[in-house]
Amino acid sequence: MKKIPFSPPFISQSVIDEVNQTLESGWITTGPKVKAFEEALALRLGIKEVIPVNSWTSGAILTLKWLNLKEDDEVIVPAYTYAASALAVIHAGGRPVIVDVMDDFSIDPEEIRKALTPKTKAIMGVDYGGWPADYKPIYQLVEESGINFEMRGENQQRLGRPLIMADAAHSIGAERNGVDAGKMADISVFSFHAVKNLTTAEGGAIVLNLPDDFDKQETHRWFKLMTLNGQTKNALEKSQGGNWKYDIVLPGLKINLPDVLAAIGLAQLNEYDHILSMRKEIFQRYLDFFRGKVWTITPEDIWKNGTPSYHLYPLRLKDFKESQRDQIVDQLTEKGIASNVHFIPLPRLSLFREMGFRIEDYPVADQLYQSMISLPIYPGLTREDQEYVLEHIEAAVLKVLS
């Protein structure tokens, strides 16, 4: 029996060489590799202001702290996302306001409209599976809302409206309506966790795309300082002879990305077009197989006017219930195929239930959850392995239906 993992990292020889070079250099914390990775990522995204961090979550928390959230401040997040989207709001001192999503898994602008209040400080879209949310109508509805938003603090006042933020954990390399991921929202946060298309093992990046009212260089400097305890010199700068004196100018965090991890990302970034092409090929193979099957809804049925990053292949099982979906997952496991479910909606999780959120209020998110399976999709998944996955998916579905 085959053993097909869900999402192993893509570790090429160039990654190994880059990491070995870093280890042999004697410098493994934040230093020259992080700087090179930051510059390469900025070039890839076409945005100058990029701040590497040690995780998506820490990047999102810092972004929300930049807004100086207080206890009653609200941040709107979609129900269909990983818990970190809402946990970042809590850790930054605000209150998550959860709204339902649309059939394409992205946050529903009409539900945002209903949830807006004077206390709304930010709206977070989630680029599910590498498919960017549509941020344009979010900007429009905020502008047209007529709400007198309570803008507290210099950054909020300069914005004059809630921050539009992208949870772009899945979407590096994607575009929608001709706009690349990273350029759709005021601030986007990417993830480079081990299972992501581009990995640093653990890590992420904050990308600034703020209005021209902001001094972008100064804002970039603030974020960089805040990732390292508000310290005016990093460890590499301090290590230079006679350069040890530093100052603490901000109440910063300790969320810097180290060189040994940036080395992985730097090598992967240099071959990311190849990584994307391999993922696309598998995604297309799945599309070709499922097209026309009466029991599924394919991504091409719902993802229009854009190109995903092919992070996930979400298999939507038409009219299936949770128990039927679980049977299929179990049958795949018996055949050595690791699948997953992205995600358990927030209101189904104990923490958010205890905060008063009820899954009955999120019918679209709940229906998506009950009827979807994430299939293996990664470089290294051979054509033979793909055929094996598809063969046993179809057999499992037909068995459940019968």
Image (cartoon, rainbow, N blue to C red):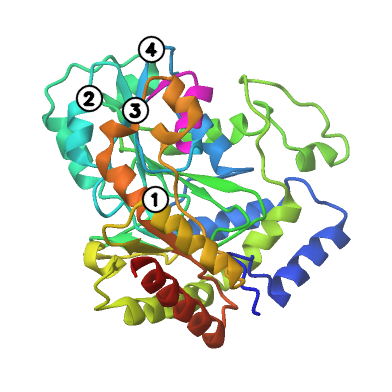
107 with respect to 146 (left or right): right
275 with respect to 149 (left or right): right
For residue 315, what is the image quadrant?
bottom left
Q: CA distance from mark 2 to mark 3?
A: 19 Å
Which sits earlier in the primary sequence, circle 1 or circle 3?
Answer: 1
Query: Where does label 2 land, which residue?
Result: 116
Which sits earlier in the primary sequence, circle 2 or circle 1?
Answer: 2
**Quick one: SS at disc 1?**
helix
Q: Is residue 93 located in the magenta-colored stretch of the structure?
A: yes
Where is residue 17? Give x, y as percent: 77, 71
Hey, what amino acid is under mark 4? Answer: Asp
Is residue 66 at all visible to an observer of this figure? Answer: no
Query: Where does label 1 land, which residue?
Result: 322
Hey, what amino acid is under mark 2? Answer: Leu
Q: Residue at x 23, y 19 (%)?
A: 117
Q: Is residue 95 located in the magenta-colored stretch of the structure?
A: yes
Q: Residue at x 49, y 49 (%)?
A: 190
Which segment is the magenta one?
Answer: 85-96
Choose mark 4 or mark 1, whichever is in front.
1
Residue 194: mark: none
Q: Mark 4, residues whose alpha carbon is within 10 Å: few (<14), some, or many (≥20)? A: few
Choose mark 2 or mark 3, whichever is in front.
3
Which sits earlier in the primary sequence, circle 4 or circle 3?
Answer: 4
Q: Quadrant of the N terminus?
A: bottom right
**Quick one: SS at disc 4?**
loop
Q: CA distance from mark 4 to mark 3?
A: 20 Å
Q: Quadrant of the C terminus?
A: bottom left
Q: CA distance from mark 4 to mark 1?
A: 35 Å
